[in-house]
Image (cartoon, helix red, strand yellow):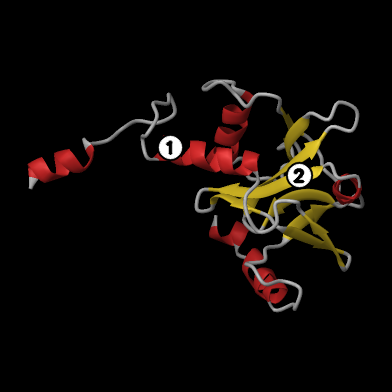
Amino acid sequence: MGLALDPAWPISKTSADTPIHHLTPKVLWLFGEDHLATEVGTSNVFFVIDDKSTGVPELVTPPLDRGDILPGITRKSILELASGSGWGEGYENLTVSERDVSMKEIADAAAEGRLKEAFGAGTAAIVTPIACINYKGDDIQFPTGEGAGPITQRVFNDMMDIQFGRVDCPWSYKVGGGSEAMAASA
């Protein structure tokens, strides 16, 4: 695992040294001639893009079928949570897709006002919003600025509620009895 992620660290450091970045920059890894988004830094990447014809927001992440995306449990959990498959009610008025996303689609959606949010997700990061993508010298800004958009925030909150046992979920198993059990055993 360390070797798979190791190449991202020096490149992220290099991108941090560029003057346009004042946050914690990460590399958006691209694949092939179409510059398909794969991962961001060492995390899975998700985009929220309004559908061109219906206006319904789509939560999209690259598919696993090429073999270049790590099939992480955080990724799987977000897909199941947002789609309502397996647990929860899902996210109303949101389409959830695993499909290729090219930089052309991202740039076009931004120019048309349909690119709403993006975030990286993984074991350590859980959910981290993306504020800007610099592509070929141009900044593609997200309307959420440096903060999390409403879908990103909801995914983060729901994942944290599950992780800390604040909601019952078939994915999690509570161990121990919390602070009361710790105090009683002392």
The answer, for residue 7, to whether it is visible in the render is no
Task: Characterize the local packing of mark 1: few (<14), some (14-19) or many (20 or more) Cα atoms within 10 angstroms.
Answer: some
Count every numbered label the image shows and give the total. 2
Figure check: 136 above or below 165: below
Q: Position of residue 135 (x, y in %)?
A: 85, 62
| In the image: residue 5, left or right of residue 178 | right
Label 1 amino acid? Asp
Q: Position of residue 112 (x, y in %)?
A: 91, 45
> Which residue is denoted by mark 2 in the rendering?
116
Label 2 amino acid? Lys
Element under label 2? strand
Figure check: 26 above or below 162: below
Task: Characterize the local packing of mark 2: few (<14), some (14-19) or many (20 or more) Cα atoms within 10 angstroms.
Answer: many
Q: Residue at x 53, y 53 (%)?
A: 125
Distance between the alpha carbons at the discs numbered 2 and 1: 24 Å
Q: Residue at x 55, y 54 (%)?
A: 1
| Residue 21 figure quarter | bottom right
Q: Residue at x 62, y 68 (%)?
A: 9
Q: Position of residue 84 (x, y in %)?
A: 59, 22
Q: Nearer the viewer, mark 2 or mark 1?
A: 2
Q: Position of residue 120 (x, y in %)?
A: 64, 50
| Residue 17 figure quarter | bottom right
Q: Residue at x 59, y 52 (%)?
A: 128
Figure check: 123 above or below 71: below
| Residue 140 figure quarter | bottom right
The answer, for residue 69, to whether it is visible in the render is yes
Earlier in the chain: of badge 2 and badge 1, it is 2
Element under label 1? helix
> Which residue is denoted by mark 1 in the rendering?
161
| In the image: residue 19, left or right of residue 34 | left
